Image: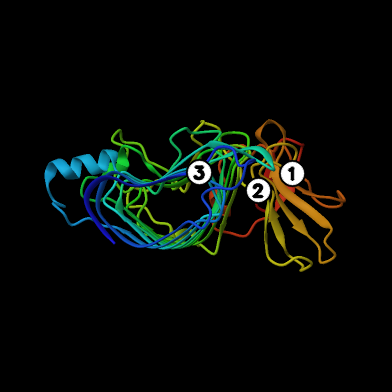
Amino acid sequence: MSITAATRCFDVEGAPNYNNGQTATGLRLARVYFNGCWIKGIKLVNIDQTARFDDLRWDYIWNRNAANLVAYTRANMVGVDAEYVANAQWNNIEFAFMWHPIELRNSTVTSGFGAVTFAANAWQMTNVSFNETCKGIAIPNGNGTVTSGSMTNVIAFSDTTTQCAKRDPIFFDFSSDQANWSLSHVYAGYLQTVAAVGHGAGGILKINDIDVVNYDAYGNGSGGQLPAFRISANASFTLEGSPPRGIRSTNAGPLFGAGVDGSQGNMEPFTIGAAGVEGTAALEGSRGGAYAGEIAFYLPNGKRSGVIGRGTGGSINIQPDDDGAVKLQGVTVLGALPTSCRGQPHAAIWSNGSNLQVCP
């Protein structure tokens, strides 16, 4: 099926109360070419049964380059509007030249489970392309949007012609404490911020194997730099199989930044090396508390042997757990290194508790 120059193309809405029976069962939509659905391609409301979507293409050629149409589609056109859609399965989907390919909003359905509220739950999306779009996933109502899903084999490139991503810079927006999504095998480019998760009290985003050609691609217009990922406090963010050198920015934006709510997410502890292997070190991260910023070293039996980390008053501690070796804390070195010692091996000698004398 091909639909040309329409305003709204499909509207499928189930009942808000399923206690009297099920509705919206057996929903399947396949092989549709959206040659212009200027306002909304598919609206789905209160779909409590598995819906299947395959081979859907938003890539209009009807007056594609008309200036007024370009301006309108990049400010208004929505691909899929989902309000309570459970367990939807999407395959071979292409969104192109639009404002928001996917918008997620909460709705409530009463059934045998009682009153349940969410926007999109347990979505499964495979082979999805966001081709020259302003955004990927939007949550217009922000925090409190309840959504979960996974997306695999993803192409994500923003509209380089209008650079409309500058107006709404988070491409995959999961900035809700009730969001739980995973993205796998992603090739992305010319984005502002790749993704955001959480709003200060929760949120989960797992990313595996992502290659970003360029984030912070257009700058923010005020000389600042945009992060690739915005992570709120208490959100869980996982980045696996993706070396930082594969997440690139021509404007040198930071890799991580504060969440949409302004709170700053923290790195969870991680291990360098294998458990039970001598020399393994674990970066305790920036969680705050007693071990903030420490690097802990472990013995083959798994026992921690010592740490390098912060002390009191801005000092640095190098301390074994058993307190059996050198401990340097609150040390001040006065004066420059003597010329005769420069470039030479030298020993540090504990002196009077405040100064170190260097060079034999």
Sooner in the amino-acid sequence: mark 2 or mark 3? 3
Q: Horizontal and vertical percent for residue 149?
A: 55, 53
Q: Which amino acid does label 2 sit on?
A: Glu
Along the line of sight, which residue is nearer the eye, 9 or 203? 9
Give the distance between the C-alpha atoms of the residues marked 2 and 3, in whole angstroms: 42 Å
Left or right, 336 with respect to 278, comes to left
Q: Is residue 166 visible?
A: yes
Q: Which mark is nearer the camera, 2 or 1? A: 2
Q: Which mark is nearer the camera, 3 or 1? A: 3
Q: Horizontal and vertical percent for residue 28?
A: 45, 59
Sooner in the amino-acid sequence: mark 2 or mark 1? 2
Give the distance between the C-alpha atoms of the residues marked 3 and 1, in whole angstroms: 68 Å
Mark 2, residues whose alpha carbon is within 10 Å: few (<14), some, or many (≥20)?
few
Q: What residue type is labelled 3?
A: Gly
Q: Do the residues labelled 3 and 1 touch (CB within 8 Å)?
A: no
For image coordinates 32% across by 38% down, the residue present is 220
Identify the secondary structure beneath mark 2.
loop
Query: Which residue is disc 2 drawn over?
Result: 268
Identify the secondary structure beneath mark 1.
loop
Along the line of sight, which residue is nearer the eye, 212 or 49? 49
Mark 3, residues whose alpha carbon is within 10 Å: few (<14), some, or many (≥20)?
some
Indicate whether 71 appears above or below 326.
Answer: above
Sooner in the amino-acid sequence: mark 3 or mark 1? 3
